[in-house]
Image: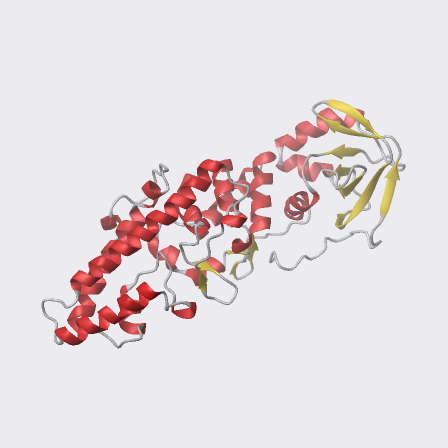
Amino acid sequence: MSDESLATCPLLSTQENAERKYQNLESFANGETHPVANVTVTEDQEIWFPDGDIILLSAPLTENTAVGFRVYRDMLARESSVFRKIFSESLPVAPRTADGCPVVHVDDPPARLRVLLRVLVCGEDLLHRDDGISVITLDSLSALIQMGQTYGIQDILEDGIARLKKYYPTSFNNWLDCNHRSSLISDVEENPAEAVWLARLTDTWSILPTAFLACCGAGNMPSPNGETSDKFYLSKLGELDWEDLDRIVAGRIALERARTGRIVNLTRSVPSEFCKHPEKCALTFQRTLQDLDAGVLDGENAVELFQPWGEWIWRDGQHGRLCGPCEAQGSQIEFRGTLETWCALPDIFDIEVVEWPRSFRDLL
């Protein structure tokens, strides 16, 4: 089922904003019980089975209010050894509702716990639909990965990481395929640092180069209108540590230099040895460089830091096209320079990635 359609589970309570107060409720944490007076447990509107045999109490929303999920103990224990351990240790001392249902406290926020229960209890597949892949929000994917790791549910963890690796690939061609990547994960621009954090959490180093690339606004971030953006998301990177922030700032500078280097190489290629119109091609390219230097090429004509320049210059430029031999030679030089920059991304961001291609020849 698509992540975008939040279908309710069967047998859910139809009572909206249902609240049940348990006086002197004890929450279980680290093997000890702690009295919490006058806790208000709000029934989750999406996942609350009246005949469930356990209530999971999420991390408190406020000092004395928490969301509860009434579910089936065996369904969780069957999928997770961590849940089995929690239940075995906490049930003997767990507080109970008036109808005898035990209440077990977990440290997960309700939104994250809800995503996991949609999969384990409601049987939703947030990553696929009947005819193929289903787009998932980054928040939901992050919740699946974190919960899969926290509760030792390997298939959920591995499926989540696999989706993340497809969005942040080691393949240059796959990175440029914005349409395909935007069909995998949505709302990435809202929190570009999340992928870096997840990579660190799960030791998934192969996604770090493109995750950092996205953080410095340097690489083909799919947007809802299908266009790409070249924003520097520093204001949205507050959750990263200073070392990673330094990597992003230094990486942005290095990528700017790499782009300048590609432009210099292009200038040396025009006019080519077999140019049909040397003066015209030289003038066309010179005027384009002047526009770039003046910063007048923006909006829909702007070129991403990591987007190949050649094709844009002689097919979409404002001063006419170059001749065939100049275009061919420039394209070859530009393509090689772009691949070399791609292969250098781990070095640019000062990280070690074993799976990353080391030479542009590895990408051919």
Q: What's the residue at 31%, 61% (across, down)?
A: 308
Q: Nearer the viewer, residue 360 or 124?
A: 360
**Quadrant location of the N terminus?**
bottom right
Task: Give percent across and percent down for residue 221.
Answer: 45, 57
Task: Give percent across and percent down for residue 154.
Answer: 54, 38
Q: What's the residue at 46%, 49% (across, down)?
A: 215
Q: Nearer the viewer, residue 164 or 295?
A: 295
Q: Nearer the viewer, residue 284 or 304?
A: 284
Task: Give percent across and percent down for residue 37.
Answer: 86, 31
Q: How many marks?
A: 0
Q: Is residue 269 left or right of residue 225?
A: left
Q: Is residue 154 left or right of residue 11?
A: left
Q: Is residue 198 left or right of residue 54?
A: left
Residue 233 in sight here: yes
Residue 363 in sight here: no
Q: What's the residue at 29%, 47% (across, down)?
A: 343
Name the image quarter holding residue 315. Answer: bottom left
- Rendered image coloring scheme: secondary structure
Name the image quarter holding residue 23. Answer: top right
**Quadrant location of the C terminus?**
bottom left
User: Where 160 falls versus 327 (above or below)?
Assistant: above
Task: Give percent across and percent down for residue 63.
Answer: 78, 37
The residue most toward the front is 294
Name the image quarter holding residue 129. Answer: bottom right
The residue most toward the top is 32
